[in-house]
Amino acid sequence: MALLALRDVSFAYGSETVVNGVSFELSPRDFLCVLGENGSGKSTLVKGILSLLKPSSGEIFMGDGLRASEIGYMPQTTQLQKDFPASVFEVVISGQLAKRGRFRPFYTGLDRASAEEKLDSLGILGLRDKSFCDLSGGQRQRALLARALCAARKLLIMDEPTAGLDPHATEELYGVIRKLNEDGLAIIMVSHDTALAKRCATHILHIGHPGQCGYCGGQRVFFGAASEYYN
Amino acid sequence: MLDNLIEVFSYAFMIRAALAGSLISLCAALLGVSLVLRRCSMIGDGLSHVGFGALVVAFALHAAPLAVAIPVVGGAAFLLLRLSEDGKIAGDAAIALVSTSSLALGAIVISKTSGMNVDVYNYMFGSILSISEADTYLCLFLSVVLIVMFVLCYDGIFAVTFDETFARACGIDAGAYNVVIALLTAMTITLGMRMMGALLITSLIIFPPITSMRVFKKFKSVVICSAVLSVTCFLAGIILSCLFYTPAGASVVAANMAAFAVFSVIAMLKS
């Protein structure tokens, strides 16, 4: 049974359609890479899957008991403030909020242990009490990944996780992500690095503007196994 | 000098003012951390101008000042949020529109009624004498509500402040947090502005968090430091104002400026 299925889904801001009739299916343990140029609606699609936007048409199905709030989400770091006073631990444990009931006001020891375990598994337990804004780009991405893992049950969505990283840090982060996938987590990764996508992903979804249709939103150009993707 | 101080604080109204003001400062600092970090610092300034307009109108109509000002400022806070969420008018522009409009309305009402007098001057620059017993109870009530909510929603407030999109993805109702924060800010501003003055009340929201962030790099430390700093500076300001017969609001701001300078030096020495 599919973990996630989109059928003819469109998203629009006001009268402007940004994503137009996209369909795909994701099975547990899949690694889907979403490719496309800037402005093709990749980030909008991600927000839609996270239920932050309502589709203007089409339907999104979630299987296997998955709920939108249990999808781990790793946003682009460029959207975050550079001078925010927060320790790495404060940032990471906020991912546990997704699993916390609406009426339970405080984190439990279990929440704390889970956050520490995620830090440890990503090799940044030593940075626990560091200030988030003092971290290097790669460390910051790991911290955000740890936060996403706190929230994730079966699916992790990443929006350009390697943007702004040097090649070494990029390679390392891909290693970590591949390992997570091998351990059983389904992954959706937005990227525009075609070569790496073909190497890491099991499936590729390419959205863009085919032909002259520049104003009707990003459409599906390709969806299928990574090995079948040429371009 | 000390005798003078002891004598001043033997009056019931001074004790009331000090108590109510400390509570307001505490509330303002707690809200301020979130507002400043979300680049909403000027919302307090906008709301205090709306409050000024509302107070002047209430004064002209001989109505109870807070009964008019609290709902009006609350409404304005809600409106400001809506305007900036719609995205049709930028947030800072929306604040400027609303605040200058209410200031203009206030000025027209003043010119047609009392003219510039001591009461109007006090609304602008603040006066300790303006705190009644009922106000003190209202401050007490507000601060208890705010502190309880802040503690219960602390983790959510952190998440929404740090990364609203992620918080929403976690299933947190960020919109509700925004409304609650705006309404509490409106209450705090309205209660505090007669003591601090419409032109100076924003300082209570902005100074303590900014000062704390000079030295502290964790959210929790910044929150705690802001709260302590805010109350300390308020009391220091009030004492200064009694000793040197300076306006209360201005003296509190001066104390906050001094704290900012001290924290900046500490930050420089640390790095």
Image (cartoon, coloured by chain):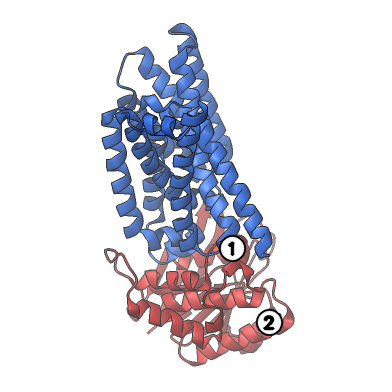
Chain colours: A red, B blue
As rendered, which of B113 and A183 lies closer to the eye?
Answer: B113
**Quarter in which the C terminus of chain A is drawn:** bottom right
**Is residue A174 among what the camera can see?**
yes
* Marks 1 and 2 belong to one chain: yes
**Which residue is at 34% across, 80% downward?**
A110
Which residue type carries mark 1?
Gly
Q: Are marks 1 and 2 in contact (CB under 8 Å)?
A: no
Circle 1 Cα neighbour tier, 10 Å, few/some/many (<14 / 14–19 / ≥20): many
Circle 2 marks a residue in which chain? A
Q: Is residue B141 left or right of residue A97?
A: left
- Residue B114, compared with residue A184, is above or below; it is above
Label 1's element?
loop
Question: In the rendered image, which quarter contains the N terminus of chain A?
Answer: bottom left
Q: Report crowding for label 2: few under 14, some 14 to 19, many 20 or more residues within 10 A (C-alpha).
A: some
Residue A56 seen from this side: no
Residue B190 image offset from top left, x and y in percent: 39, 33
Identify the element where label 2 is drawn.
helix
Q: Write the residue at 33% across / 51% down.
A: B147
User: Which residue is located at x 56 percent, y 32 percent?
Assistant: B96
In the image, residue A20 sits, relative to residue B185, either above or below, namely below
Q: Which mark is residue A41?
A: 1
**The disc label shown at residue A169, or none:** 2
Q: Gap between marks 1 and 2, in whole Å?
A: 26 Å
Disc 1 sits on a residue from what chain?
A
In the rendered image, which quarter is residue A226 located in? bottom right
Q: Residue at x 46, y 32 (%)?
A: B196
Residue B118 drawn at (x, y percent):
46, 14
Q: Nearer the viewer, residue B131 or A13?
A: B131
Mark 2 residue type: Ala
In this view, the residue farthest toward the right is: A167
